[in-house]
C-alpha cells in the first residue's frame, strides 16, 4: 500500500570482525581489529540497500558497542520499520526514536541502508536525495597512531611520496602529556613544512592539562586540535578556543553529536570546527542538520570517521559531498587501515584527495562473499 513498491520488507544485521593492518593506538587503548555492524534492508520491489555503523574498541569511544548496535537494530529498530513506507526518511527516523532512545549509531546504520535501497530503486546516487553534490573531492587525512615515532614517520613519508596524504592526525592522550608533546614535536620536525599536522586527544586531558600543553603543540606546528577535553567539558573547550584563537583551531568531536549539542557549542563559541560523523549524529539526514548549525554559526566542518569499511565511508562521502565550502577536509581512510574490504570498488585517492563517489546508491558494490568471510557469527569469535 505504499506507492511503487516503496515498502520496507526486511532488515537484517550482522557483526563483522576485520583485522587492522597494524595496531591503532588511541587515548583509551589500542585496537587490532574493527567490528562494523552491517545492515541489509530489502524493499517490497526487491531493491536492497546496505548500511554500516562502526565504533572503536567496543564501548570505549562512547556508550555504544558492536553488540549493543546489533541488538538495538534486530530487537527494536527493524521491527519498528517493517511494513513502513521507505520513501519517508524523516518518518522512519521518528519511528526509530519512538522505539528506542539514543542509540544513534544503530539508527544511522538502518537509515543508511534505507537511503541506499531507495536510491538504488530510483537508480540515483544517494547524494541526489541528500541535497546535491557540490564537492567532487576532499583532502584526505591519514592518522599516525602506531605509537612509534620512526614507524609514524615512515608511514607519513610513504604516503607523501604516493601523493595520497599530506594531512596527518596524531592520536595522543595515552601517555604523559609531556611525552605526547615530545612525540608530536619529533614527527613535526621530521615532516617540517611538508605536511599539515593535527592531533586528536580523544577527551583524555582535564582543562588544566590542556591549557598547559596545547600551546606547546601549537609551537611544534599543530594547527587543528580535536577534542582535547572530556565531552561534557564545554567550559574548558570554550576557554581553549578563546586562548588559541589565531594560532590553531579547536575541533569538537565527542562533544558534538545532536543538533542541540551543535547549537549549545555555537551559542557558547566553544569551538572553531565540528568533526561530522554519520554514526554519532544518528544518520545522513541528521549529519546535514548538525552541518547546518555549523554553517549558520560560522563554524567549519571536517569529514570525520569511525574507521568504517568502504561502505560506511562511501555513505559518509555522499553526505559530505553536499555540504558547504567552509571545510577542513576529511579522514575517511578506514578502508586503508583494514586488511581487506567488503566492497568490489574502493573510492580512488588521487592528488592527496578522496574522489567522492556517485551512485547508484552509495556507488559501492558490497560483496556478499566478503560479508560471509568476516561474519562473526560464522567465525564463532568472541567479542573484543
Ligand atoms: C576519532 O575520535 O576521531 C578517527 C580516526 C582515528 O584514528 O580514530 C577515529 C576516531
Ligand atoms: Mg576524534
Image (spheres, grey):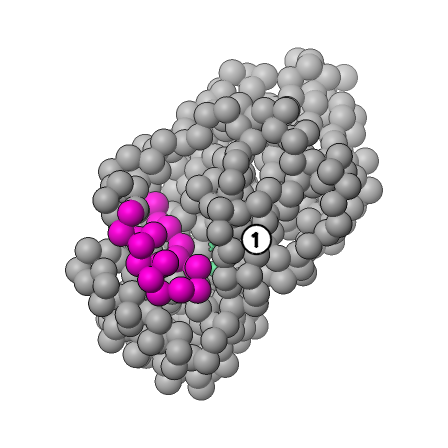
Count of numbered marks: 1
Q: Is residue 151 magenta?
A: yes
Residue 148 drawn at (x, y percent): 40, 64
In the picture, the quarter occupied by the C terminus is bottom right
Residue 316 drawn at (x, y percent): 48, 40
Disc 1 is placed on an element classified as: strand
Residue 59 drawn at (x, y percent): 67, 59
Label 1: how many residues lie within 10 Å, few (<14), some (14-19) or many (20+)? some
Residue closest to the eye, 349 or 246:
349
| Furthest residue in direction left, as rendered | 193
In the image, what residue occupies the spot 60% across and 42% down? 18
Asked whether residue 290 is in view, the answer is no
Q: Which residue is mark 1?
A: 32
255 versus 301 height, above or below: below
In the image, what residue occupies the spot 66% across and 40% down? 16
185 versus 132 height, above or below: below
254 versus 110 height, above or below: below
Q: In the rendered view, does 355 fall on the left or right side of 340? A: left
Q: In the rendered view, does 7 fall on the left or right side of 176? A: right
In the image, what residue occupies the spot 45% across and 50% down? 304
Residue 101 drawn at (x, y percent): 73, 53
Residue closest to the eye, 224 or 130:
224
Residue closest to the eye, 154 or 213:
154
Res 63 → quadrant: bottom right
189 versus 114 height, above or below: below
Residue closest to the eye, 99 or 204:
204
In the picture, the quarter occupied by the N terminus is top right
Question: What span is colored magenta in the figure?
Answer: 139-158
Q: Is residue 317 magenta?
A: no
In the image, what residue occupies the spot 36% across and 59% down? 152
Amino acid at each position: 500500500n505504499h506507492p511503487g513498491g516503496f515498502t520496507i520488507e526486511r532488515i537484517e544485521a550482522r557483526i563483522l570482525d576485520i583485522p587492522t593492518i597494524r595496531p591503532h593506538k588511541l587515548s583509551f587503548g589500542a585496537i587490532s581489529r574493527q567490528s562494523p555492524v552491517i545492515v541489509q534492508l530489502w524493499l517490497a520491489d526487491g531493491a536492497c540497500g546496505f548500511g554500516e555503523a562502526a565504533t572503536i574498541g567496543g564501548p570505549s569511544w562512547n556508550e555504544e558497542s558492536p553488540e549493543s548496535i546489533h541488538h538495538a537494530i534486530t530487537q527494536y529498530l527493524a521491527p519498528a520499520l517493517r511494513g513502513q513506507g521507505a520513501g519517508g526518511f524523516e518518518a522512519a527516523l521518528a519511528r526509530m526514536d519512538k522505539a528506542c532512545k539514543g542509540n544513534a549509531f544503530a539508527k544511522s546504520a538502518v537509515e543508511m541502508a534505507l537511503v541506499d535501497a531507495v536510491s538504488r530503486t530510483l537508480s540515483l546516487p544517494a547524494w541526489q536525495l541528500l541535497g546535491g553534490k557540490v564537492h567532487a573531492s576532499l583532502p584526505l587525512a591519514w592518522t599516525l597512531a602506531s605509537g612509534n615515532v620512526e614507524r609514524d614517520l615512515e608511514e607519513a613519508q610513504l604516503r607523501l611520496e604516493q601523493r595520497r596524504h599530506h594531512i596527518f592526525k596524531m592520536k595522543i592522550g595515552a601517555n604523559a602529556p609531556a611525552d605526547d608533546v615530545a612525540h608530536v614535536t619529533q614527527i613535526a620536525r621530521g615532516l617540517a613544512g611538508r605536511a599539515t599536522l593535527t592531533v586528536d586527544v580523544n577527551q583524555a586531558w582535564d582543562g588544566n592539562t590542556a591549557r598547559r600543553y596545547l600551546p606547546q603543540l601549537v609551537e611544534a606546528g599543530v594547527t587543528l586540535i580535536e577534542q582535547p577535553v572530556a565531552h561534557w567539558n564545554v567550559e574548558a573547550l570554550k576557554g581553549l578556543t578563546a586562548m588559541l584563537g589565531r594560532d590553531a583551531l579547536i575541533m569538537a568531536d565527542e562533544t558534538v553529536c545532536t543538533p542541540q549539542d551543535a547549537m549549545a557549542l555555537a551559542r557558547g563559541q566553544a569551538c572553531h570546527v565540528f568533526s561530522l560523523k554519520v554514526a554519532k549524529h544518528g544518520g545522513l539526514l541528521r549529519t546535514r542538520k548538525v552541518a547546518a548549525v555549523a554553517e549558520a554559526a560560522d563554524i567549519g566542518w571536517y569529514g570525520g570517521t569511525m574507521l568504517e569499511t568502504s561502505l560506511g565511508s562511501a555513505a559518509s562521502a555522499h553526505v559530505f559531498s553536499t555540504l558547504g565550502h567552509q571545510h577542513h577536509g576529511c579522514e575517511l581512510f578506514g578502508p586503508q587501515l583494514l586488511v581487506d574490504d567488503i566492497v568490489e570498488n574502493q573510492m580512488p585517492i588521487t592528488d592527496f584527495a578522496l574522489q567522492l563517489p556517485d551512485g547508484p546508491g552509495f556507488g559501492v558494490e558490497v560483496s556478499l562473499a566478503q560479508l560471509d568471510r568476516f561474519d562473526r557469527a560464522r567465525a564463532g569469535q568472541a567479542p573484543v
